Amino acid sequence: MERSGLSKILIITYPDISLGFRLSGIEIKEVEEGEDITSILRTIVTKGEYGLLAVEEGLLSKVPDEILRRVRKIGIPVIVPINTPRSWHGEAEVESYIARVIRRAIGYQVKIKR
């Protein structure tokens, strides 16, 4: 198992949500709602490319507990469940959410200008 990419981050999310994350420069894997990501997780763990996985909470629910326990036991990648809104009620809410995600990802507050 290769461990050269421990500082790499991958976000596994839905196609309609991925753009905001892409704007932050983070690598994205798009999956459809309800898709089973067990094989994706196995491949990621085996290759050892990522140190952190942010995964839509709904997608994690289909992954068998045994796989999640195995990943936790190894310790890398760290899996962080995220729960992004499935619908937006206005541009300000979208911008606010994206700014918070970027702030968490890079550690700095970003002001989004139009």
Image (cartoon, rainbow, N blue to C red):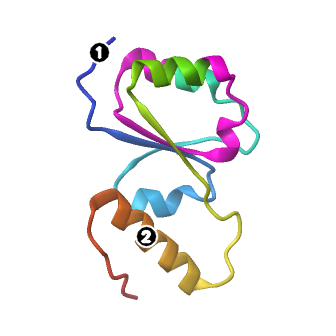
- Count of labels shown? 2
Picture quadrant of residue 64: top right
Where residue 98 appears, as percent x and y from the top left, is: 47, 70
Where residue 95 appears, as percent x and y from the top left, is: 49, 78
**Contact check, label 2 and label 1, Cβ < 8 Å:** no
Q: Quadrant of the N terminus?
A: top left
Q: Is residue 54 magenta?
A: yes
Residue range highlighted in magenta: 43-66
Q: Which residue is at a point 27% across and 31% down the rendered structure image?
A: 6
Q: Residue at label 2?
A: 100
Q: Secondary structure at mark 1?
A: loop
Residue 63 position (above or below residue 55): above
Residue 24 position (above or below residue 11): below
Structural crowding at the residue carrying mark 2, measured as other residues with C-alpha within 10 Å and reported as few (<14), some (14–19) or many (≥20):
some
Q: Which residue is at a point 43% across and 70% down the rendered structure image?
A: 100
Q: Which mark is residue 2?
A: 1
Q: Which mark is residue 18?
A: none
Query: What amino acid is labelled 1 in the image?
Result: Glu
Q: Is residue 77 magenta?
A: no
Where residue 107 appears, as percent x and y from the top left, is: 27, 63
